[in-house]
Amino acid sequence: MNIEIKKSKKPVKYEDALNFMQERLMNLHTNNSKELIWFLQHNDIYTAGTSYNENEILDKSIKIVKTNRGGKITYHGFGQLICYFVIDLKKRNKDIRRFISCIEKSIIDTLKFYKIETFADKKNIGIWYKNKNQIKKIAAIGFKVSKWIAYHGFSLNIDNDLKKYESIIPCGIKNKGITNLKKIKDQNYDKLEDILVKNLILNLQN
């Protein structure tokens, strides 16, 4: 499969990541480049997707960066793994719902490796973890499709500062919380990227 896997060691500026993806999208559209799966981290930033509402900003002093992906407001920061992609849906029957399922399954299968059971929810996009009677989000998914190419991606909380979410209503959902992998199970997640890559490639091929 002709997909470039890119891993950035240092935090990437949000605007730089967006420009890089948009350039790759145009090149992919004209058959001048490969598809892309890109792992990185951002420094502290709140981003608002195309369907956010102002009342979802609880702390009016924070800076919000408006972006063209789908979804609402979320937070990115250290300790959170970002996976961006530029994937051609023309090669995958132009099936957006199936593509979302493929991303969801890849994250769920990866967390199963760590003995953590999670699930997807058609009403509330993302990956969720249930502990007793509480349901909390572990991964947020938000992307855009242009020229039948999907870009942006998802974020997976590993060891990030959960207090940062108190400034917003994350993804516009009031009655569910946010968690990270270290809170669920304190173990070594160093190989997580490698397992996630394998699952993504496997599921994108099927």
Image: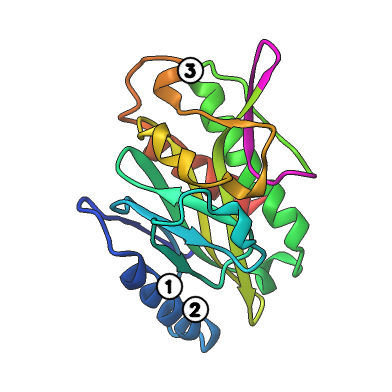
* Residue situated furthest front in the rendering: 60
Q: Is there any visible trace of residue 146 in the rendered image?
A: yes
Q: Nearer the viewer, mark 2 or mark 3?
A: 3
Which residue corresponds to mark 1? 21
What is the distance, in whole Å, between disc 2 and disc 3 at their CAs? 36 Å
In the rendered structure, the answer to whether residue 84 lies left or right of residue 78 reads right
130 in magenta: yes
**16 left or right of 136 in image:** left
Magenta residues span 123-134
User: Vertically, is 29 above or below 79?
Assistant: below
- Does residue 54 appear to the left or right of 21 in the view shown? right
Q: Residue at x 32, y 20 (%)?
A: 188
Secondary element under disc 3, as helix, strand or loop, is helix
Residue at the spot x=36%, y=35% of the render? Answer: 160
Picture residue at 68% right of the left edge, 74% below the top:
90
Neighbour tally class for label 2: few under 14, some 14-19, many 20 plus, Cα within 10 Å = many
**Furthest-bottom residue in view?**
30
**Spot occupied by residue 155 in the image (x, y as percentages of width and height):** 48, 46
Front residue (pair 119, 25): 119
* Residue that numbered label 3 is attached to: 184
The local secondary structure at tag 1 comes to helix
Furthest-left residue in view? Answer: 10
User: Which badge, 1 or 3, comes first in the chain's sequence?
Assistant: 1
Observer-nearest of 47 and 197: 47
Say which amino acid is labelled 3. Ile
Cα distance between the residues tagged 1 and 3:
32 Å
Badge 2 amino acid: Leu
| Residue ID at (36%, 74%) | 20
Colour scheme employed for the rendering of this structure: rainbow
Q: Is residue 199 above or below residue 14?
A: above
N-terminal-most mark, 2 or 3: 2
